[in-house]
Amino acid sequence: MDEAAALLSGAWTPHVLWYLSKQPRRFGELRKDIPGISARTLSARLRELLEKGVVTCTPLATSPPSAEYALTEIGHKIVPALTALVDAALKLRLGQAPAASRRSGQ
């Protein structure tokens, strides 16, 4: 569990993974996808995810030079867990989760 938590640690990390799960993205596209994230924080998250082997970075032959970020095989294995978390959060928001008193039999 500690390794799983460490994998998702860092502010905005789940957001970065979520948006990369749809398709490879450039840095600027991720900044637009994730309102509120600073360029410095996004750079740090991408660097950490690259070091952990969760994300790849492919340089693009464009002018000016740019790169595209994508999930690795390991990164794609995280997506179902993120999807389950999002689904649970939506159910909680919509009041579809059982109340704590009903779960405990009170």
Image (cartoon, helix red, strand yellow):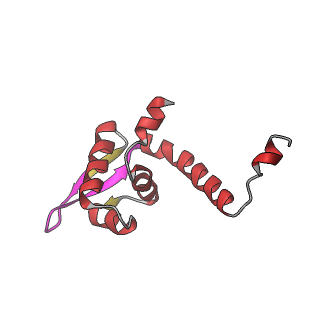
Tell me what residue is drawn at x 28 percent, y 54 percent: 41
Q: Which quadrant does the C terminus fall into?
A: top right
Front-lying residue, 42 or 55: 42
Residue 82 appears at what percent x and percent y?
Answer: 53, 49
Residue 3 appears at what percent x and percent y?
Answer: 44, 31
Which quarter of the figure has residue 33? bottom left
Placement of 34 over or under 86, stated as above or below: below
In the rendered image, residue 66 lying in the magenta stretch gets the answer yes
Front-lying residue, 73 or 5: 5
Name the outermost residue toward the right.
106
- The mark tally for this picture is 0
Left or right, 34 with respect to 100, comes to left
Tell me what residue is drawn at x 50 percent, y 42 percent: 77
Residue 27 appears at what percent x and percent y?
Answer: 28, 61
Which residues lie in the magenta part? 58-72
Placement of 95 over or under 101, stated as above or below: below
Tell me what residue is drawn at x 80 percent, y 44 percent: 103
Which quarter of the figure has residue 61? bottom left
